[in-house]
Amino acid sequence: MSDDLRTNGSAPTTDNSRRLREESVEKLILQVRQALSGLRYGQIVITVQDGLPVQIERTEKTRLR
């Protein structure tokens, strides 16, 4: 294995790509908070591709008493 690869097998990140990833995480957190807002029963599903979140699904259930 090359010394350039991390232990998880991915190439080392540059400062710029690390900053972009951190911004992506902050944006994801805001979007998840919005999806959770007002949700009483249901689920939030985050779809990840290539290690990055690409989709958030919100499914809300209505409980009948």
Image (spheres, rainbow, N blue to C red):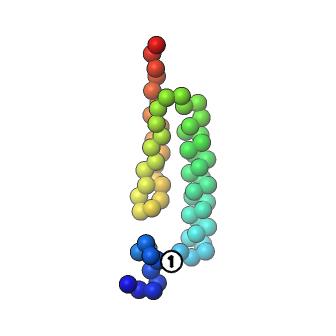
Q: Amino acid at mark 1?
A: Pro
| Residue at position x 59%, y 35% in the image | 37
Residue beneath disc 1: 12
Q: Residue furthest front?
A: 7
Q: Residue at x 61, y 55 (%)?
A: 26
27 vs 6, nearest the viewer: 6
Give the residue drawn at x 46%, y 36%.
43
Which of the pair 57/40 is nearer the observer?
40
Residue at the extreme left of the image, as rendered? 1
Position of residue 35 in the picture relative to residue 50 (left or right): right
How far across and how far down the image is residue 59, in percent? 45, 34
Against 40, residue 25 (above or below) is below
Which quarter of the rendered picture does the N terminus lie within?
bottom left
In what element is the residue under mark 1? loop
Number of residues whose C-alpha sits closer than 10 Å to that of mark 1, classed few (under 14), some (14–19) or many (20 or more)? few
Horizontal side of residue 19 vs 64, given as left or right: right
Above or below 4: residue 30: above
Residue shown at 57%/58% (left/top)?
A: 24
Viewer-proximal residue, 3 or 17?
3
Where residue 45 sits, quadrant-wise, is top left
Can you give x and y, in whole percent of width and height, for residue 5 in the image?
44, 80
